[in-house]
Amino acid sequence: MNKLLAPATMGPYQLSNRLVMAPMTRSRAAYDGSPTDMMTEYYTQRASIGLIISEGTQPSDDGQGYLSTPGIYTDAHIAAWKKISDSVHAKGAHLFIQLMHAGRMSHPDNTPHHHQALAPSAIAPNAPMFTPTGMQEIPTPRAMSLDDIQQTIADFRHAARCAIEAGADGVEIHGANAYLIQQFLAPSANTRTDQYGGSIENRALFAIEVARAIADEIGADKTGIRLSPQTKLWGIDEGADSVELYHYLVKELNKLKLGYLHILHQGNEELVTDLRKIWQSTFILNRPSRPREQIGSDIASGLADLEAYGQMVLANPDFVERLKLNAPLNVADRNTFFGGDAQGYIDYPFLT
């Protein structure tokens, strides 16, 4: 526990501790995608954490999947995120904005332009999604043209620049959880026959090109990426060669000298250990449903440099203080995770 709460260096940054707030969609942004004052309060409450990774934030109109998620590609978005970054910094935390393109995990009714979603291939995820008129089946997306792919890479680059202008310390590329980048990795969602489909090298190409573009735009040490190897969610299946795929992808990303790799542990301990050995900079590990008695264990063993927590931080704005004092933890209210008002968002009690 002492090591967990000790300062840590991550690229150019000195973090106050080795705890990370994992990215969590909360659906409290304004209709235009601008963060709200309530969002500023939410992140500021939790700014005793060394590194805050924001909720998934779309890099364009095309990137939005869910209702009331924030964007980071307009002047209004920049101004609103600036309030959050200034407030978080004043409390001593660092902020990375996660750039999330939902790809096929979207519904036209949820986006500003009401267009058909973009994806590697025209394959629906066979899943429902909440929309303004209730739950609807997600429609079949449009297969991206080569021009669409280049425009999307440019959108990621632009959004990263906007994040830095908004005062963020960097950005995290969302390459996990069945969204666009992982859709390219998975043969179940990617049946392309061009340079972006088929082989391991081709399926990994989009992720590598997005990372290279962002690193070129804002600096590699301000660029992180989150991956969830072997996720099986919403029709995603990365195939029999998934271990080789992630060995290759992480080796190629490592060549870019990114600031960190953030892994969502899906149960394959051997693969996670392999990726840790390949990766040369900060390694963040997020184990879902980790019991309290195991907090800090991956740092102690050397498997991770930083540990990321989601629901525990969501429900405990003073998570760091509770760990220091071995105090009881609030339990997260799942009914208030997505959308709504202050309840279950900024009203979780502090110790004092």
Image: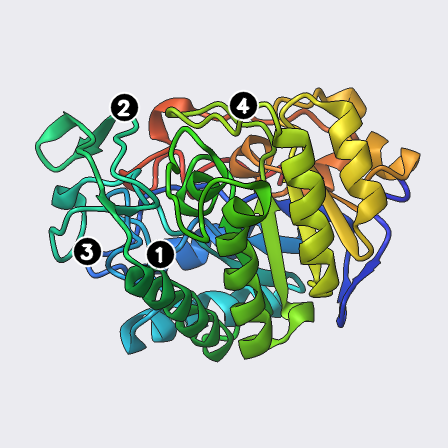
Q: Nearer the viewer, mark 1 or mark 2?
A: 2
Q: How many residues crowd mark 3 within 10 Å: few (<14), some (14–19), many (20+)?
A: some
SS under mark 3: loop
**Of residues 291 and 171, which is closer to you in this image?**
171
For the residues marked 4 and 2, what is the alpha-carbon distance in whole angstroms? 28 Å
| Residue projecting furthest to the left | 133
**Between discs 3 and 2, the one toward the N terminus:** 3
Q: Residue at x 71, y 23 (%)?
A: 268
Direction from residue 133 to residue 239 in the image, left or right: right
Q: How many residues crowd mark 2 within 10 Å: few (<14), some (14–19), many (20+)?
A: some
Q: Residue at x 46, y 47 (%)?
A: 181
For the residues marked 4 and 3, what is the alpha-carbon distance in whole angstroms? 29 Å
Q: How is the image coloured?
A: rainbow
Q: Hey, which quadrant is residue 344 in on the image? A: top left
Residue 332 at x, y percent in the picture: 49, 26
Q: Nearer the viewer, mark 3 or mark 1?
A: 1
The residue tagged 2 is: 127
Residue 31: mark: 3
Residue 331: mark: 4
SS under mark 1: loop
**In the rendered image of this protein, does residue 67 appear above or below residue 258?**
above
Q: Quadrant of the C terminus?
A: top right
Residue 58: mark: 1
**In the rendered image of this protein, does residue 284 appear above or below residue 146?**
above
Residue 297 at x, y percent in the picture: 84, 30
